[in-house]
Image: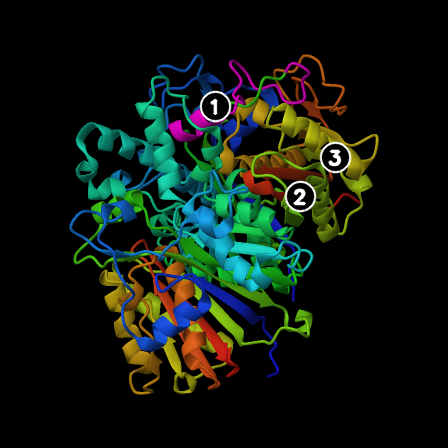
Amino acid sequence: MTHRVVLTGLGAVSSIGMGVTEFTAGLLAGRSGAKDITSFDTTGFDFARGCEVPDFDPKDWIEKVPIDTIGKATQFAVAGARMAINDAGVDLDWLRSRRGLVSIGTTDGESNELDKMVGVELESGRAAVSATAARKIPATRLSLAIAREFGLVDVEATTIGTACAAGNYAVGYGFDVVRGGEVDFALCGGADAICRKTFTGFYRLGTIAPDNCRPFDKDRKGILHGEGAGVLLLETLESAQARGARIYAEVLGYGLNCDAHHQVAPNQDGVAKCMRLALDNAGLDPSQVDLISAHGTGTKANDVTECGAIHDVYGSAPPRTVSLKSMLGHTMGAASALAAIASALAIRNGFVFPTINHVETDPECAIDCVPNEAIAADLNVVQNNGMAFGGNNASVILGKYPVAA
Amino acid sequence: MSATGPVITAWAAVSPFGTDRKNFLDGMAAGRPAASTSKPEDGVVPGEHGFVVPNFAIREILGRKGTRMMDRVAALTITAVGQIFDAGEPGNAPEGTGLVLGTTTGSIWGAMDFTRTSMLAELPYHVEPGRMPGGVMNCAAGHCAIWYQLTGPNTTLANGRPSGLIALRYVRRLLARGRANTALVGSVEEYSLDRSWLEYNARDGAPGPLGEGACLFLLENPGSVSPDRTPLAELCSVSSRVYLEDDPRSSMHACVLDALTEAGVEAADVSIVAPSGFTGAAGEYESEVLDGLFGRVRPQWVDVAGLIGDTGAVSSSFQVAAALGLAGDRPGVAVVTSVDADGTIACAVFRLFGVQT
């Protein structure tokens, strides 16, 4: 027996707002999270802009797990989960008395803590690293800390390390497990914290923009490193209806595949195939899709490849195609989870969030990226793309609930 | 042999006993610890010893093409998969084959050394760009997909010691949902000085020596098995739960019962038990729970960690391989359990077909 799966709780930890209300306001305003990076010493880099979560105080969100025992990405994940639980209007007894899945995707896990560890090693030697610092590292803690914080034992806790598409992998996994009736709820999403290692890597690859992220623009200069968490509460339609929950959107399907082509460069055929797999899984024709929330990193390699794939699937007049990364930067493992949240909010509230910092669309992209200002729109179906190093793709399809007559 | 669940039709192990499955089987059958090393150049913390895969020089084993920047995690994985698909000739994997790989945190060396290079360089971006993907956890799975043209679902699960079992459950669901018909599933861990120090600094109580390796299985829907492959075992169930400090035993007990119930198996039916052998407190609770459930049944107990050390994320996959291998031609039911220090307990139940592996 399979169930319909709906989104009833959303938690957004982002550079443009905390929680649904602020995040929605940020999306509607086309707010930018870009500032100078303060998470690590940026001396020696010619530029170091990024999208950090401002004024994050873990004590506002985390009560049970000792804060000094978990790294920043894990703190973001727990904060996002608390927001999603509160937003869904379920109490902890409800969660604890049901079987659940906790699945958090990440690119870097606690690499920020690893970076600090290398600093201690170079300063004082390897033996100077404390046990508390060393124990923060295993990436499994991103999902386990959520279970610990809320006292959930009858849950499967799984951290998905499929890099920059990991948020969609986690949401897709939650979809399959809830759909199959194996669990009653799923807390799924992604989390990452800005770290020196990844900033340095992208900088060295020449893919970091010096100022702003301009996806699909002919003068794009690359990505901005971002951070945050997106956590979504998934449950069956019957469960949501039984407790009178607000339903943001229905998860209609997803697809995942691998380019098997290049470690770093995306592949147009692989991305197109993934988008088709998602549409097939949802039982939809491309003509039924109203909006594409693109991976949209703001590098030429991504934008041209992804738009090529979109044209392969959708033909010469694809639906509006927007990039949340223009506002949030690339939040890595959180990216497609935050984009899924943005997509659900767009469906629920009838708007399309814009691609900001946009001046002139690259003719090689040839899409309507909804430049700079949000627009009102009635959306029935949104396709949310995530792509990662390793040729790992995942695409999630969300739909309006109830379906328009 | 009428399996309804997915079946294992092939497996490979690159272990401290040697680079192939036969080395692993012979080593497990002999029941003597693998040769250990105490050389810092092998990545061992001074004063300790550990178990590395012997003579594992990446470029000698995999050739010079495409391996210049390859880390040990990726190389161990590619080597193992090569033993499943006919000497590793690309193109031998069925179309759309998936790969689900368990890890702790990818290559700790790859991540830390990238930052170390940056911090020691004259300018912080004087790093080797080709080393960047190696600092991300999905590097090995991506490399392996390119090497063998695996275009199906490709997922990296970072669940530490139990990740081999968590990966089996993930693939079970992929197969059940039709997202793949055939998938490679397993896990990998490398020995490095960085991992060694990390574990040393994090350790709680009496430490055990570390080990490394890669171990993968080919898991298929029973209807998709090609005539040239023989089902070796059926994956009947996988369960996992979270344990909290206040009552770890009850979570572990419930987890094992979940798996037995789903598999439709009684404790008395179990012929092989392969526990994690984890040396921390969680390992002691696990032993107590297993003793309570199976002590009177007297199945064969399989000790992997005692022979090749704490192999981290690959430990649970090695346990499955050991159960398959030690069963030999005797049909039976195997229970494999895994715990970590962070709060995960997992259990898998297999029906062994008594086919010599």
Taking the magenta stretch, the answer to whether it contains residue A205 is yes
Figure quadrant of the C terminus of chain A: top right
For marks 2 and 3, the one nearer the N-term is 3
* Disc 1: host chain: A
- Seen at 55% across and 42% down, the residue is B65
Residue under numbered circle 2:
A398
The answer as to whether the residues below labels 1 and 2 share one chain is: yes
Q: Nearer the viewer, mark 2 or mark 3?
A: 3
- Provide residue A236's location: percent of width, then percent of height: 59, 56
Q: Along the horizontal axis of the image, is B119 left or right of B62?
A: left
Residue under numbered circle 3:
A310
Residue under numbered circle 1:
A204
Quarter of the image for residue B54 reads bottom left
Q: Amino acid at mark 3?
A: Ile
Q: Which residues are magenta?
A: A195-219
Q: Amino acid at mark 2?
A: Leu
Residue A312 seen in render? yes
Q: Residue furthest right?
A: A316
The answer as to whether the residues below labels 1 and 3 share one chain is: yes
* Disc 2: host chain: A
- Provide residue A314's location: percent of width, then percent of height: 80, 37
Q: Is residue A326 above or below residue B138?
A: above
